[in-house]
Image (cartoon, rainbow, N blue to C red):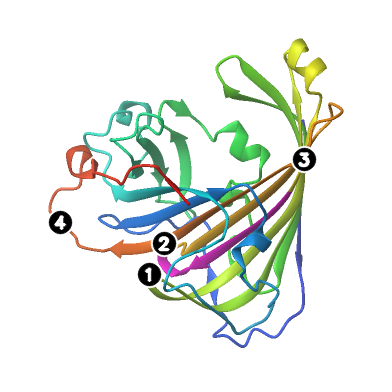
Amino acid sequence: MYRILLVFVTVVSRSFGDLSLDPTAIGSLGESHSFESLSFEGTIDDLNLDLSDSSSDFYLDLSNGISTDKSVMKLSLISSIVTVDNTPFKDLYPEADRVYHTSSPTDSFLPDQWQYYNSKGVANQLLGIDGEVGFPALLTARDIDASKWPESLFLGVGWDFSIEDIEVSLMPGLDVTFAVNYTNIVDAVGTIVTPAGTFDVLRLKRVGEEIVSYKDPALASSIGDVRSQIVEYFWYGREGILPLQIREEVALIAAGGLPSMEQTLVTILNDVDRTNTAVRNYSWAKVKLSDFNQLD
């Protein structure tokens, strides 16, 4: 396995309050964040958003949510920062002091997820997800381990990342090898408005390529390598708030005759609940979510 992380800083004028944020922040105990996630076949251009503004004072108004002419799949999520007590995998994480719980109890295809964190160090450290102790290999391959990023994000900071020959199990019986190259840059700072409110944010732009090779000989022969071009945007706010995320993937399959595939995923923050109740545990966190709907 070969990995490179090279940090660089672009000289810019940081006029928007010199906003600097911890990329590992997840919020405070007792908070819950409500999101709407949309996925569709298409690219970021189909969202009809102007994301060309790379500046120190941009403004993006999504107070009415996200819309597109494409047919989308819609999912509502509620994520809560809870104590470790009474969570199902607590015995695997004796160092954990908080859990980021995302729940969809009415939808069998998306089971509850439990992310265990230790927040006592300089950065919030993800100890594992559910019963998988350690940082997940797929997230490592995609450079999503924010504890390995620069300690602070601010306008102009960036880094290059590459990794080769990391083996990942996408699901039982489906093992692949990843090769990845990403360029990351905080290219804008300003204000974003979502249904959850108005937030001062930094925008992290990630552009990269992922090459997936199947370990199974039959799949390797029939499909070949899958080469994906990735464009991602993350809008980071204070205190672990993430008002908006967008990921575009255009995948080209090596096997002849198969068309490229375009997929875009958007997650927007709809509400932040900072009500500090006396008990935050597994029973409280099982919040009913809306069904996964096909919208025209």
Residues shaded magenta: 230-239
Pointer 1 or 2: first along the chain: 1
Q: Between residue 192 and residue 251, name the one nearer to us.
A: 251
Percent from the top left, x then y, of residue 33? 34, 57
Percent from the top left, x then y, of residue 81? 31, 50
Which residue position is annotated with label 2?
269
- Neighbour tally class for label 3: few under 14, some 14-19, many 20 plus, Cα within 10 Å: few
Residue at 66%, 71% in the rendered image: 51
- Neighbour tally class for label 1: few under 14, some 14-19, many 20 plus, Cα within 10 Å: some
Percent from the top left, x then y, of residue 20? 55, 73
Q: Quadrant of residue 275?
A: bottom left
> In front of the other: label 4 or label 2?
2
Dot 3: what SS?
loop
Q: Residue furthest front?
A: 296
Type of amino acid under label 4: Thr
Q: Are marks 4 and 3 in contact (CB under 8 Å)?
A: no
Type of amino acid under label 2: Leu
Give the label on residue 195, or none.
Answer: 1
Pointer 4 or 1: first along the chain: 1
Gap between marks 4 and 2, in whole Å?
A: 21 Å
Gap between marks 1 and 2, in whole Å?
A: 7 Å
Residue at 82%, 16% in the rendered image: 221
Pointer 4 or 2: first along the chain: 2
Which residue position is annotated with label 3?
260
Type of amino acid under label 1: Pro
